[in-house]
Amino acid sequence: MKNKRILLIISGGIAAYKSLELIRLLKKSGASVGCILTKGGEQFITPLSVASLSGQQCYTDLFSLKDETEMGHIQLSRDADLLVVAPASADLLARMAQGRSDDLAATTILATDKPVLVAPAMNVRMWNHAATQDNMIRLEQRGILRVGPDDGEMACGEYGPGRMAEPEDILAAIEKHFAQNKPLAGKSALVTSGPTHEPIDPVRFIGNRSSGKQGHAIAIALADLGADVTLVTGPVALPDPLGIKTVHIETAAEMLAACNASLPADIAVCAAAVADWTPGKPLDQKIKKRGDKSPPDLKLIENPDILATLSKGPNRPSLVIGFAAETENLMDAAKSKLKSKGCDWIVANDVSEGVFGADENTVTLVTSAGAEEWEKAGKQDIAHKLAQRIAAHISQPQHTPRLKSVLS
């Protein structure tokens, strides 16, 4: 469950109090939990209690100007790996079956492209009613997952099916869902991320504007598919991903050493923006201004080529992917880099329009077979798509889609 992003939707019903324990269990398992609380759910628990346990804002209103500006319902629906509706009331199940979008919960579910798991909770007569059964059948035919309901005593005093599954059982169902979708289980992956800082003196360095957002997102996406990931990162302002071995370096030489120490690996994704040059002899003391106002004489030497070294070395991973960050002649540079470095794929992106540090990216996947331009998307979505492509290649290389040739 580490690095899993769960969006928990809490609808109306006395079972809503159990959702607080579910949040605690999910957090304890290593998952990140975002929450939506319906108006009915607010009759039983408060947004403050939900936010306090989840550590994140609790969303309640579809038409909140502040929330829609900062994190709209479309983004909420797509940022999660799984949507969990617990409790799922008869009313919300009915609205889901009808494709309604009359509150934040229903709209988010309608807008999502991620799996949805429901934990129904209602009176036994409501659960057994033909309308509810028809709605549940329709939802399951659409791929909605279900856990429960259990037989038990209701808050109304009746006994029978309709009691929400216990939080431990819901957690087990979530874990089972993720365990069934691990195409990279048993595979190891090496990912580089961020910039390198090449020291000039104790206070100055040669560096670049890479934030590490794309590289870190790729490491998380590969881990989500079951890979055992080692992330080698330069200086970034990002937290270490949970459950991923993270090695911090500063220079290109240190990054290469860390990469070599992480071999052998099945997959290598070199997303770091490695400095091409480094001062040949960094000074021990801070450089002072000269009386004649002349600049210091910096002797630069070429840094080791990490991508080429991994691609041509004796412990070469089965799949080596490089990045080409360019400001002009993107495709020419990407094709040239693919040939000269000896890697299998190049992810080319134009960084002339503020890609460094941004949350979105536009990339083109270049292989010896051709090129495929991907639509502009969030870096997490780019990472997920790349990870899925890697998984397809590793499991069935012969089924890798044929791309329009650009190398002939």
Image (spheres, rainbow, N blue to C red):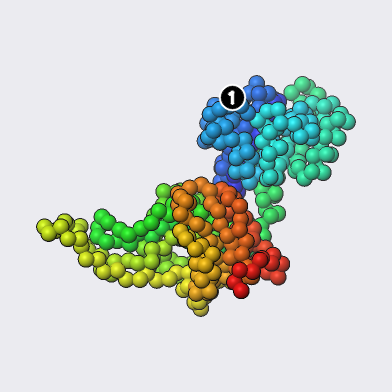
Q: Residue 246, can we see it?
A: no
Q: Is residue 249 left or right of residue 29?
A: left
* Residue 160, position as x, y percentages in the image: 82, 30
Specify the quadrant of the image occupied by residue 46: top right
Q: Which quarter of the figure has residue 91?
A: top right
Classify 338 as above or below 349: below
Inspect the image, locate mark 1, and give the three-letter code of the amino acid beneath it.
Thr
Q: Is residue 67 placed above or below 242 in the rendered structure?
A: above
Crowding at mark 1 (Cα within 10 Å: few <14, some 14-19, many 20+): few
Q: Which residue is more in the foreground, 87 or 324?
A: 324
Q: Residue at x 57, y 32 (%)?
A: 68
Expressed as whole percent of the image width and height from the top left, the position of residue 70 reads: 53, 34
Q: Residue at x 71, y 37 (%)?
A: 110
Helix, strand or loop for disc 1 = loop
x, y (%) of residue 133? 85, 34
Q: Is residue 239 above or below residue 371?
A: above
Q: Going by the picture, which residue comes out furthest to the right?
A: 130
Q: Residue 351 location in percent, x, y?
A: 47, 55
Q: Which residue is located at x 76 percent, y 38 percent? A: 148
Residue at 46%, 58% (x, y): give it: 327
From the viewer's side, name the closer residue of 258 and 106. Answer: 106
Q: Is residue 156 left or right of residue 288?
A: right
Q: Can you name the residue that lies furthest to the bottom here?
A: 314
Q: Quadrant of the C terminus?
A: bottom right
Q: Residue furthest front?
A: 329
Q: Is residue 127 shown to the viewer in this render? A: yes
Q: Is residue 366 left or right of residue 310?
A: right
Name the residue that disc number 1 marks.
46
